[in-house]
Image (cartoon, rainbow, N blue to C red):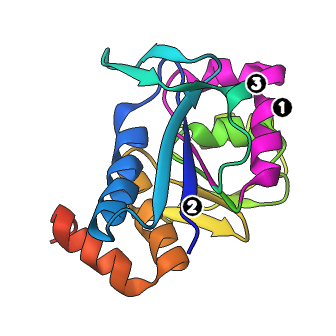
Amino acid sequence: MKKLQVGFFLFEGLELLDAAGPWEVFSSADMLHEGTLFELLSFSAEAGKVRTVNGLSLIADFGIDEVSQPDLLVIPGGEGSRRVAADQVLTGRLKELHEKSQYTMSICSGARILAAAGLLKGRMFTTHHLVYEDVLRIEPDAIPDKESRYAGDGRIYTSGGVSAGMDLAFHLLEKLYGKAAAEKTARYMEYGE
């Protein structure tokens, strides 16, 4: 079985748990299955250090032009998502990566980035409770789902704020590798107990 490549897009001002939570889910699942499920990588507009909204620095291993075809594209949120959403070149490149991916997921205000890339038109989405109006300003034809922790159809999934990204990561883990893999990972992480 081919390992799936999971590409995490990092940017200045991202919310740490938006990236770290799903990273932990996918990396733990991979470890529990002897390195057979996922290959995780981090990338940004350019390789190097990015600072989270709360001041912790992360290292993006690759620049966006070095990433060709992640199977799963992960777009976190955070205050910096406003700047990314306003960058048409960057959102265009992320849209190209989405078109080659099996699934794309956004966490929290990462939905702004999907909206700016034209990926939420006519689609149900969820996001942080303070970000719905902003997403709808960017994409008026998006359909808000304010009741769910995550929403998605087909290839695009969105989650509510911060911790909801882990719920979505578990959902996609189950979709890709089955309920047993998701439950084993949740037990290992002592998640939801």
Q: Residue at x 39, y 48 (%)?
A: 23
**Helix, strand or loop status at disc 3:** helix
- Nearest the viewer among 170 and 85 is 170
Q: Can residue 68 be seen by looking at this rendering?
A: yes
Mark 1 or 2, closer to the camera:
2
Q: Which residue is mark 1?
A: 92
Mark 3 or 2, closer to the camera:
2
**Helix, strand or loop status at disc 1:** helix
Give whichever of discs 1 and 2 has the lower sequence position.
2
Question: Callout 2: 10 Å neighbours few (<14), some, many (20+)?
Answer: some
Q: Can residue 120 be seen by looking at this rendering?
A: no
Q: Residue at x 71, y 42 (%)?
A: 114
56 vs 87, left or right, is left
For badge 1, the amino acid type reads Gly
Q: Which residue is mark 3?
A: 90
Marks 1 and 2, how far apart at CA = 23 Å
For badge 3, the amino acid type reads Leu
Q: Which residue is mark 2?
A: 4
Most common SS among magenta residues: helix
Q: Are marks 1 and 3 in contact (CB under 8 Å)?
A: yes
x then y, percent, for residue 139: 81, 42
Give the residues drawn in magenta, as a range. 72-101
For badge 2, the amino acid type reads Leu
x then y, percent, for residue 22: 40, 51
Q: Is residue 145 magenta?
A: no
